[in-house]
Each structure stands twice: as structure tokens, then as C-alpha cells.
Image: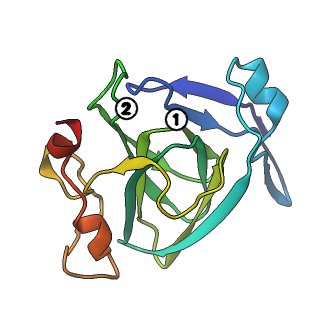
Amino acid sequence: MTTPFAIEPTDIDGLLVVRMKQITDDRGTIRELFRTSAFADAGVPVGPWLQVNATETQQGAIRGLHGEAMTKLVAIVYGEAFGAYVDVRPDSSSRGKVVTVPLVKGTQVLVPAGVCNGFQSVSPGVSQYLYCFDQEWVPGMSGVAVNPMDPDLGIVWPVPVDVNDRAQLSAKDFGLPTLREVLG
């Protein structure tokens, strides 16, 4: 069985949900994590990717919401996660919008530079989350971040979060500004 490559727009300008091309047979599944020509044919030229990271995250833990000055292509390669995205770009027509996406194998999200990206691992044990960056990450690089627990975001994290449990939420992420503070 073959699942074709497809791209779906969201309420955030430039934030796209990508369904990977997948081929499944009796042996298992092959997923195309990235094909330059497929994105170009869809009118979404991206890359080249200059850095690729993978995180392994325990169930219930949140990473983000971070909006560095780089485009990201993110995907789950093991387990499941709940992705959250916030547009904080000053000149964006969708500034202030929040989009959430269930992240399962075969689903990716293309995150434009300046849109905050975060996720919560929801599968038992761990999830593995892949990030492709069009810039190399460096400490202090420009960008904006938002507190993922800000109630004004309206994000309902699927796994209850104890904000004092550092295995679920870092002190750094909990100390980030609210959306209202970021938007000014």
C-alpha cells in the first residue's frame, strides 16, 4: 500500500502539515522523511538542511515553545507527540494564532522561521522527535520563545503537567514570557 506525499495548510501562514510518502508491505513501512523534488513540485521549496537533531522525550514532557530564526521540518520517528505552534512574527497576517497537530509516524510539520515550535510526548515510554534546520543552531541566536503553560494560548496538553516537575517542564521554558508579553 502506498500513501502519497501531501501538504495541508493551517491557520498559521506558512505552517504546513506534511503527510510523508509511505510504502507499506508485509515487511513494514518505508517513510520518505524528505525529498527536495516533492516539496518543490508542491510549490514549497525548502532546505538545504544544515543541521538535523533527534530528541528522545519521556511521556508527558514538554519541549518548547521556541521560535528561532530558522525554518524547521519536524517529525516523529518513534512514538507519538502533540505538536503546538504559535505565530509571533511581527509582520505576519496570522500573528498570535495557535495551531496544534497530533504527531504520529508519517506526519511532519514545516515550521516557518519565527513561528514557535513545541511538543509534548504522549506515547508510553518515550517518543523520538526529528528536527531538520535550514540554519545551524547557535547559543543566543535570534528568535522568540513563549511559555508553553500560558493559559492565553488555549493549548490543552493531553498529559497533565506538573509545572514543578523538571522531568515534564524545564525551568527555562516555564520562565519564558507569555504570548501577551511577546506580542506587546
Task: Quarter of the image for the C terminus: give it.
Answer: top left
Q: Nearer the viewer, residue 103 or 45?
A: 45
Query: Where does the image place residue 55, in percent across and percent down from the top left?
Result: 57, 69
Query: Where does the image place residue 146, in percent across and percent down from the top left?
Result: 28, 51
Q: Residue at x 70, y 17 (%)?
A: 43
Kind of element beneath mark 2: loop
Residue 71 seen in the current view: yes
Query: Where does the image place residue 126, in percent across and percent down from the top left?
Result: 51, 75
Kind of element beneath mark 1: loop
Identify residue type, mark 2.
Arg
Q: Nearer the viewer, residue 183 or 116?
A: 183
Query: Where does the image place residue 163, in percent across and percent down from the top left?
Result: 19, 73
Q: Which mark is residue 138?
A: none
Query: Is residue 101 left or right of 134 when viewed as pictured?
Result: left
Residue 178, above or below 171: above
Identify residue type, mark 1.
Pro
Q: Residues within 10 Å of mark 2 (few under 14, many from 20)?
A: many
Question: Which residue, given by chain and number where applicable, does mark 1 sit on?
Answer: 112
